[in-house]
Image (cartoon, rainbow, N blue to C red):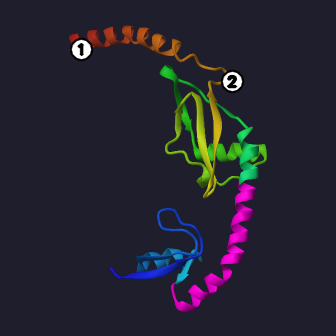
Amino acid sequence: MPHTQVLLREDIDNLGARGEIVRVKSGYARNYLLPRRLAVEATTNNVRQIEGEKAALAKREAKDRSSAELQGDQLRKLTLKFERKVGEAGVLYGSVTSMDIAHELKEQGYEIDRRKIVLREPIKRFGTYNVPLRLHREVTVELPISVLGEGGVEVNVEAAPAEVESAPAAPETEANEADSEQ
């Protein structure tokens, strides 16, 4: 496949930083980077223009970073609590996703895009978690999250497995009796 060189106008994960010239497949540049104005073709004129804009970009970058740090300081003081139905062995009915976290943050008055919440997989067990928020390329904040049982009840982790181990004894004997009848 043919490749082309583009000049990045924004930071793109797994590709490069703003102002870098990178080599990408032509289709990726033509169908994704160029229409979204994330990059421009790496011509001499465009490179010169970006060099001239670097001072303005540096100021904007510093402003974005400082605002992200201020927002991060405010978010460090915050603890989110989610109440979910809890089944046997502490497993939740449903889960807590990045969209749930973003919605709760919005209710608290913080406008955070759900893609900035670094949650590899949804939370499916009760407990306390630290979820990273990537507010800026250089600013990441650990947000404490508590997942509680329904009604705000903290589920006892040690007691839950003991109840589960004693409960299935009766159904197993019924299943064994049903197998012996057939």
Tell me if I can see residue 30 in this picture: no
Residue 135 seen from this side: yes
Indicate whether 172 appears above or below 123: above
> In which quadrant is the C terminus drawn?
top left
Viewer-proximal residue among 164 and 145: 145
Amino acid type shown at disc 2: Gly
Say whether residue 26 is magenta. no
Element under disc 2: loop
Residue 38 placed where, x, y %?
57, 74
Task: Kindly identify the residue that appears in the image at 54 percent across and 36 percent down.
Answer: 123
Label 1 belongs to which residue?
A: 179
Q: Give me the residue at 59% from left, 75% from top.
A: 9
The amino acid type, in three-letter code, at marker 1 is: Asp
For the residues labelled 2 and 1, the Cα–Cα distance comes to 42 Å
Q: State the image coordinates of residue 22 (x, y, percent, origin top left).
A: 46, 76
Mark 2 or mark 1: name the one nearer the start of the chain. 2
On the image, which quarter does residue 83 sit in? Answer: top right
Say left or right for 158 vs 128. left
Q: 110 or 46, which is in the foreground?
A: 46
Q: Secondary structure at mark 1?
A: helix
Q: Is residue 43 above or below residue 161?
A: below
**In the rendering, at what x and y percent does residue 164 appear?**
45, 14
Instruction: Give the position of the N terminus as an image quadrant.
Output: bottom left
Per the image, the residue denoted by label 2 is 152
Determine the residue positioned at 42% across, 8% down.
166
Q: Which residues are magenta?
A: 42-68
